[in-house]
Image (cartoon, helix red, strand yellow):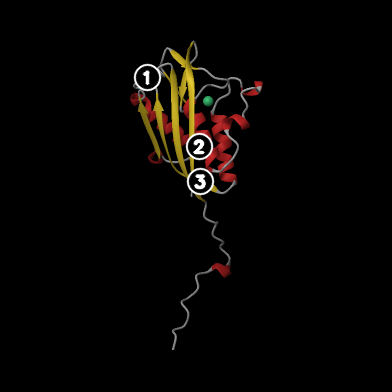
Amino acid sequence: MRIGYGWDSHEFKSGIPLKIGGVILPHNKGLGGHSDGDVLLHAITDALLGAIAAPDIGSLFSPSEPKWKGADSMIFLQEALKRVGNVGYSLVNLDCTLILARPKIGPHAAAIRARIAELLKVSTDVIGIKAKTPEGMGTENAAIAHVVVLLEKNKPKQSRSKSDKPTTVAAKRS
Ligand code: MG
């Protein structure tokens, strides 16, 4: 088993769409950033990469590279998922907490959960989405995401050759 943890924050800016967890949410501001600013997908990507001790999102997709300008963060998530598969692991479950003053996440939590499950190729019952407001933190103009993931090693594929037939119980001892 492997555990992974990811964290990210992005600042709200006017004039851009708000994307969280791969879902566009109705709001008068979006999250700034070099890519599409999807704070939740970035934290999930880092949690997956961290679980397999791979380089982090900023090392793999440098914000100084023009090719990632405005990029769909789904690309980052898919690369992390591919790397997890390459070293023989699968996602057991994911839990996240979003911290933002507005908009309320509750009405959109089911859509975000479904989209993340779809992107990670798992069922929705292993994706936890929670949201809090930043009471006393002074981060009203930011969205923050914390994510933990648990991975398990894939079982070796069963061979169907004759030698792998179940063996009968050894003869009784005398
Ligand atoms: Mg980010």
Q: CA distance from mark 1 to mark 2?
A: 24 Å
Badge 1: few (under 14), some or many (20 or more) residues near its Cα, within 10 Å? some
Image mark for residue 101: 1
Q: What is the number of the mark on residue 90?
A: 3
Mark 2 highlights which residue? 47
* Disc 2 residue lies near ligand 1 with CB under 8 A: no
Residue type, label 2 = Ala
- Going 54% across and 19% down the picture, which residue do you hit? 33
Q: CA distance from mark 2 to mark 3?
A: 13 Å
Kind of residue indicated by mark 3: Ser
Q: Nearer the viewer, mark 2 or mark 3?
A: 2
The C terminus sits in image quarter = bottom left
Q: Residue at x 52, y 55 (%)?
A: 155
The number of numbered discs placed on residues in the rendered structure image is: 3
Mark 2 neighbour class, 10 Å CA radius: few under 14, some 14 to 19, many 20 or more: many
The spot of residue 1 in percent (x, y) is: 48, 50
> Residue 76 in the image: x percent, y percent?
57, 31
Can you say whether 6 is above or below 92 in the image? above
